[in-house]
Image (cartoon, grey):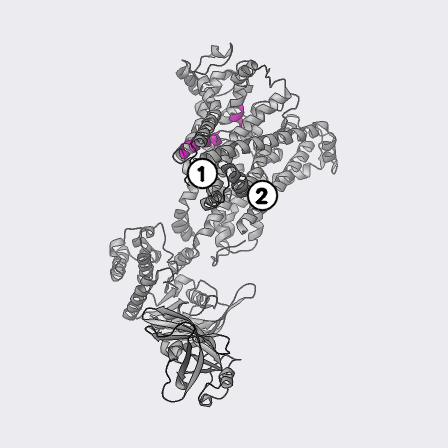
Amino acid sequence: MASIQMDDLHKVYAGGVKAVTGISLDIADGEMIVLVGPSGCGKSTLLRMVAGLETISGGTLRIGDRVVNNLEPAERDIAMVFQNYALYPHMTVFNNLAYGLKNRKMPKDAIDRRVREAAKMLEIGDYLDRKPRNLSGGQRQRVAMGRALVREPSAFLFDEPLSNLDAKLRVQMRVEIRQLQKRLKTTSLYVTHDQLEALTMADRLVVMNAGRVEQVGTPMEVFDRPATVFVAGFIGSPAMNMIDAAYLRETGSADDLDGLPHGTDLIGVRPDDLLMTPPDGPHLRLAGRVALLEPAGAESHIYVALDDGDQPITVRVQGLPMVEDGARVNLYAALAALHPFDRVSGVRVT
Amino acid sequence: MQTKRTTFSNAWLPYALLAPQVIVTLVFFIWPASQALWQSLFRQGDAFGIRPPSFVGLENFAALFRDSHYIDSLQVTLVFSVGTTVLAMSVSLLFAVMVNRMIRSRDTYTTFLVWPYAIAPAIAGVLWWFIFNPSIGILPYVLEGVGYDWNHRSSNTDAMILVILAAAWKQISYNFLFFLAGLQSIPQSLIEAAAIDGASRSKRFWTIILPLLSPVTFFLLVVNIVYAMFDTFGVIHATTEGGPAQATNILVYKVYRDGFVNLNMGSSAAQSVILMAIVIVLTVIQFRYIERRVNY
Amino acid sequence: MVENDRWGMLLSHLVLILGVAIVVFPVYVAVIASTHPPGTFVRGVMPLLPGPNALENYRIVISEGRSTAGTPPIGGMLWNSFVMAMAITIGKLSISILSAFAIVYFRFRFRMFFFWVIFLTLMLPVEVRIVPTFEVVADLGMLNSFAGLSIPLIASATATFLFRQFFMTVPEELMEAARVDGAGPMKFFRDILLPLSVTNIAALFVIMFIYGWNQYLWPLLITTDPEFYTIVMGIQRMVTGGESEPLWHLVMATVVLAALPPVLVILFMQRLFVKGLTETEK
């Protein structure tokens, strides 16, 4: 087991496209770090740089206390779980798990023991003689995990491992991976574009955008205090509403916007923080019409068109509210629940 | 042209892997081809070394186009290629359309129609040569019954028909398989939509199926022309040997005769160069078509 | 589709049966001819029903050959054809799969140059450059040898392209997973890529074997020693060599034997054959 240190990592592709610019990150031994961001943000590239599948254009990468910039993937003592599993289709599950160990010239009985241990841990012991094509999606996923596990590497690298599973299985595997990782205490780097996966699995998550880090923090830090407009929009679902402060001042619906830090000209408010009744203490009020009521079981989403406003506002409430499409509504948000941003830089104002 | 996202890095291995292929290509393809190019610019010396080869520029090419035999051969090749291509393609399209309508018997018919692919062109020639044999053949006997006196040893037309039949017969399997694959890749829903729009069976064929088959048809057109021009040496050589009176002397056969029988190296080389130019043009057309198909 | 078209279907069947009959006819005639005694071909028209001489005719071509026309017993020619076809097939497959591997899985200087060198072979069928190629082979002392029969024909742009095409569809991650698992390029090739290519190799094998077996012009030029005659060119010697009128019963027995191996290959491996044929052209 080992820590991973990224020091000012850069990736420039032939042709000049910059995929990763100046990323520095210290991952502690045993920590689960989730890289999250939209497609094309560089998160997969960064992971593949750590794996040794992409060359590093600049900066230093350490795994444990070794600089590994120029080492082959196999020499870095890492294991990787791929998005499409990348199981060797012509090999049995047993041989899929054993292949890496065989290549390391491990004695046969040791291979056998390790494979069976891993298979037991992942409950795939019954399938060891099957070929991957005879397995279900979830079983394949476990085999891919098993292949990483048997190696007992210093770090696991996960490249969107759950994105090929259906929603139900995804939740189940999410829980299993996290439990396993906590038990083994293996340093892990996990890439996903799914913000829910990121929030639920990470010790710390790294939100990336356009090759840069937007914010690093624990899930709750990132959720409660998004550092940028981008993070605010990306983490949390439905996405945070963004309202122009000038609009609020003009319509005069804010009780006391002066309570917000100086320089705030964009105000974020999560759909959960919008209430149908005024809270105690300083708050703001928004008036509009219900554009659409969307029941979603335990909760409902209300899309509200603000008076004189251009973008619709999303509200999330528990149960089914007593409003109809087209009805006038007033929305309230406690001042403490607002996220103040600077529109130009996109940075949170403090 | 792409490679994989990640590639192995090894300084010498890729060259070692390519070496056998590249060496064979250089020694037996590129080198002879450049030899032909070079020889085509010389008049050959005599066998006794009294008169050395002399550089004549494009004279060999000019001579070819003044030579009525060569012009005849061009015409013969044109008739032969067009005849073979049209016959082989239309018959196989007919078969493919019919077979595509079958459900249970599809595989049986396919099996019966594909195996002529395995017959060498030379053997195909011998088979048809035998059937049309003027003294004992079956077809001349039948033709005699309808008042036609078949003799491919004396009649230019008969000889041409014979080699076209033999060449086309062997190519039917190939075209059939491609047409069948093309037909099967046409979405059933399109044909159903046309049927709902009230198109009759024959209208559906001409307005929906045939246009959708046009990529396959175009591809086969090029392949068949290449086949007829270059792969049918055996058909000619094993049967008419270019006769009677040069009536079936197609270009590839003439190159061979002028080179190996008449030992006219300069002319044969010039003919090789022209043939290579034709193949290159056809290949480029085909390659552009493949690219287009990949891109859409 | 629900469509009542019984007459149309009947017509289709009729056309197809007629078509199959025409396609089969030349070979049927050959088989029939190979069962008749020599006298049949002297008088009148060739019969359409089998004759009594099948065993005798096949015995003659297999064990005696036709010494008058300088053709050896057929056994040797069949063997030569087989060796040549196998050598061409295995040669083509090996050098093509290796070069496709290099082109797809490595990035190196002159990669495009090599690609075009290989591509050129597609443009230069042996028939169009026959004289200079013959000279090269003669200069290398490869006349009358299996090496001369096969090596000049084993460069194959088609097979290289097919393998390249197939390798491009192999998921990227497989190679990456193998690298993480500690496999170098050749180990990846042997352990992963080769086993995955088995179907493609088999399909190409069928096509290439037929190609090799049916070679005609090349063996005609390269072999002057009857010991190296192949069956397909041997037939031509039998038709044109010797007497004015060929001994048709023996020629046709030879034709049947010459056509049998590739036809059997197609019939027994039809699925692979169709795959090989249609995919080599993509």
Q: Is residue C79 left or right of residue B62?
A: left
- The subunit carrying tag 2 is B
Local crowd size for mark 1, using a 10 Å CA cut-off: few (<14), some (14–19), many (≥20): many
Q: Which residue is mark 2?
A: B286
- Labels 2 and 1 positioned on one and the same chain: no
Q: Is residue A314 magenta?
A: no
Viewer can see residue B47:
no
Mark 2 element type: helix
Write the residue at 48% across / 64% down.
A55
Residue B186 percent location from the top left of the image:
48, 44
Nearest the eye: B122 or B140: B140
| Image: C58 above or below A120 | above
Range of magenta residues:
B104-126
Q: Determine whether A25 is above or below B290 in the image.
A: below
**Horizontally, is C258 left or right of B84 in the view?**
left
Q: Residues within 10 Å of mark 2 (few under 14, many from 20)?
A: some
